[in-house]
Image: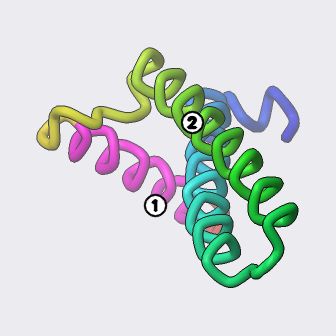
Amino acid sequence: MNALIEKLTGMDKLSDQVIATDFLISAKAGIQNYAVAITETTSDEIRETLKRQLNDTIDAHEAITNYMIKRGFYNAYDLHEQYKVDMQVTETALSLAEKMIL
Protein backbone atom coordinates (compact mmCIF):
# COMPACT_ATOMS: atom_id res chain seq x y z
CA MET A 1 0.00 0.00 0.00
CA ASN A 2 1.21 3.51 -0.78
CA ALA A 3 2.79 5.14 2.30
CA LEU A 4 0.76 8.34 1.90
CA ILE A 5 -2.51 6.42 1.68
CA GLU A 6 -1.50 4.32 4.68
CA LYS A 7 -0.85 7.47 6.71
CA LEU A 8 -4.10 9.16 5.67
CA THR A 9 -6.21 6.12 6.46
CA GLY A 10 -4.45 5.23 9.70
CA MET A 11 -3.27 1.94 8.24
CA ASP A 12 0.40 2.86 8.67
CA LYS A 13 0.18 1.76 12.29
CA LEU A 14 -1.76 -1.39 11.47
CA SER A 15 0.21 -2.82 8.55
CA ASP A 16 2.75 -4.64 10.74
CA GLN A 17 0.01 -5.74 13.11
CA VAL A 18 -2.18 -7.07 10.30
CA ILE A 19 0.71 -8.96 8.71
CA ALA A 20 1.86 -10.42 12.05
CA THR A 21 -1.69 -11.44 12.97
CA ASP A 22 -2.19 -13.15 9.62
CA PHE A 23 1.15 -14.92 10.01
CA LEU A 24 0.21 -16.05 13.54
CA ILE A 25 -3.15 -17.41 12.37
CA SER A 26 -1.42 -19.24 9.51
CA ALA A 27 1.11 -20.77 11.90
CA LYS A 28 -1.69 -21.98 14.18
CA ALA A 29 -3.46 -23.58 11.22
CA GLY A 30 -0.20 -25.17 10.11
CA ILE A 31 0.34 -26.68 13.56
CA GLN A 32 -3.12 -28.20 13.50
CA ASN A 33 -2.65 -29.55 9.97
CA TYR A 34 0.73 -31.11 10.76
CA ALA A 35 -0.68 -32.75 13.89
CA VAL A 36 -3.51 -34.30 11.89
CA ALA A 37 -1.15 -35.38 9.09
CA ILE A 38 1.16 -37.08 11.61
CA THR A 39 -1.72 -39.19 12.90
CA GLU A 40 -2.81 -40.14 9.39
CA THR A 41 0.46 -41.39 7.93
CA THR A 42 1.72 -44.94 8.21
CA SER A 43 5.22 -44.17 6.95
CA ASP A 44 7.87 -43.70 9.63
CA GLU A 45 9.93 -41.54 7.28
CA ILE A 46 7.04 -39.22 6.45
CA ARG A 47 6.01 -39.10 10.12
CA GLU A 48 9.50 -37.96 11.13
CA THR A 49 9.55 -35.33 8.39
CA LEU A 50 6.15 -34.04 9.50
CA LYS A 51 7.32 -33.93 13.14
CA ARG A 52 10.33 -31.80 12.16
CA GLN A 53 8.06 -29.47 10.18
CA LEU A 54 5.62 -29.32 13.10
CA ASN A 55 8.44 -28.36 15.47
CA ASP A 56 9.67 -25.70 13.04
CA THR A 57 6.15 -24.28 12.82
CA ILE A 58 5.81 -24.27 16.62
CA ASP A 59 9.10 -22.35 16.81
CA ALA A 60 7.83 -19.86 14.22
CA HIS A 61 4.59 -19.45 16.19
CA GLU A 62 6.60 -18.67 19.31
CA ALA A 63 8.72 -16.10 17.47
CA ILE A 64 5.66 -14.39 15.98
CA THR A 65 3.88 -14.38 19.35
CA ASN A 66 6.92 -12.86 21.07
CA TYR A 67 7.19 -10.20 18.35
CA MET A 68 3.52 -9.32 18.71
CA ILE A 69 3.70 -9.16 22.51
CA LYS A 70 6.81 -6.97 22.36
CA ARG A 71 5.11 -4.57 19.93
CA GLY A 72 1.87 -4.45 21.94
CA PHE A 73 -0.15 -6.15 19.20
CA TYR A 74 -1.02 -9.17 21.33
CA ASN A 75 -1.67 -9.24 25.05
CA ALA A 76 -1.82 -12.96 25.74
CA TYR A 77 -1.84 -12.50 29.51
CA ASP A 78 -4.14 -9.49 29.84
CA LEU A 79 -7.58 -9.94 28.33
CA HIS A 80 -8.63 -6.38 29.16
CA GLU A 81 -5.64 -4.91 27.28
CA GLN A 82 -6.21 -7.27 24.35
CA TYR A 83 -9.81 -6.12 24.20
CA LYS A 84 -8.58 -2.51 23.91
CA VAL A 85 -6.24 -3.46 21.06
CA ASP A 86 -9.01 -5.38 19.28
CA MET A 87 -11.44 -2.48 19.66
CA GLN A 88 -8.86 -0.03 18.29
CA VAL A 89 -8.31 -2.25 15.25
CA THR A 90 -12.07 -2.55 14.80
CA GLU A 91 -12.58 1.21 15.01
CA THR A 92 -9.83 1.79 12.46
CA ALA A 93 -11.32 -0.78 10.09
CA LEU A 94 -14.78 0.73 10.41
CA SER A 95 -13.40 4.23 9.91
CA LEU A 96 -11.51 3.09 6.83
CA ALA A 97 -14.63 1.43 5.41
CA GLU A 98 -16.61 4.60 6.02
CA LYS A 99 -13.98 6.71 4.22
CA MET A 100 -14.01 4.34 1.26
CA ILE A 101 -17.82 4.51 0.95
CA LEU A 102 -17.84 8.32 0.93
Can residue 10 be seen here? The reply is: no
Q: Nearer the viewer, residue 6 or 57?
A: 57
Compared with 85, 22 (above or below) is below
Marks 2/1 in contact by CB < 8 Å: the verdict is no
To which quarter of the image does residue 10 belong? top right
Say left or right for 82 vs 24. left
Say left or right for 53 vs 57. right
Circle 1: residue type: Leu
Report helix, strand or loop for mark 1. Answer: helix
Q: Specify the quadrant that holds the C terminus.
A: bottom right
Compared with 99, 21 (above or below) is above
**Residue 30 rendering spot, x and y as whole percentages:** 66, 61
Q: Would residue 96 be counted in the magenta stretch?
A: yes
Say left or right for 60 vs 90. right
Q: Which residue is mark 2?
A: 17
Which residues lie in the magenta part? 82-99
Q: Residues within 10 Å of mark 2 (few under 14, many from 20)?
A: some
**Residue 11 rendering spot, x and y as whole percentages:** 63, 38
